[in-house]
Amino acid sequence: KETYLRLGAPFRKNAVLRRLLIYTDLVLTGLVYLSYPILLCVLFFTKDVRFWRCLFVPAVSFLAVSGMRKLIDAGRPYDKLHFRPLLNKTKHGESFPSRHVFSVFVIAMSFYYTCLPVGAVLTVFGVLMAAVRVVGGVHFPRDVLAGAVIGILAGVLGFFVI
């Protein structure tokens, strides 16, 4: 608990920093989630054969991660350690693995498969998202690490191995 309170202290003391943390979470999420349908539209309208793989690999792995989260139903830091998170989150349980971080990384892998520079940018976004979700008190480090690893593995398997 002390670690989370220490990490979040500058954001709790300064309203501008807290808003910056919240907006960073929203903007990163929005940019990544906007980039994915744009990718799918470009692939579809250019009749690129990679469209179906870019549609199904993230979709199937997203469903698998969602099911895993329900089965594990791990508690969130703010519930287990009894503090108020910096990010506006009220959901209980389903913390492991982080679906936000998983999604960023599996979408980044879609771009590594189709457009390497965008994949690299989204990887940086994924690292930032993981940090924001931990500092914001809505995930444990293991949650975001697992989300990143599962997203990368799903992408490597789905785009480059199978």
Image (cartoon, rainbow, N blue to C red):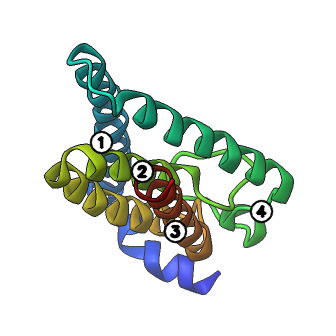
- Tell me which amino acid carries mark 1: Val
Tell me which label, 2 or 4, sits earlier in the chain.
Answer: 4
* In-image side of 64 versus 55 (left or right): right
Q: Which residue is mark 1?
A: 27
Mark carried by residue 63:
none
Q: CB under 8 Å between callouts 3 and 1?
A: no
- Which of 85 and 108 lies nearest the eye of the viewer? 108
Say few, some or many: other residues with alpha carbon within 10 Å of mark 2 (under 14 / 14 to 19 / 20 or more): some
C-alpha span from label 3 to label 1 = 22 Å
Mark carried by residue 149:
3
Element under disc 3: helix
Mark nearest the camera among 2 and 3 is: 2
- Tell me which amino acid carries mark 3: Val
Q: Which residue is mark 2?
A: 159
Q: CB under 8 Å between callouts 3 and 4?
A: no
User: Horizontal and vertical percent for residue 148?
Assistant: 48, 64
Element under disc 4: loop
In this rendering, the answer to whether 31 lies above or below 21 is above
Q: Is residue 116 visible?
A: yes
Report the residue at 73% width, 73% height from top: 81
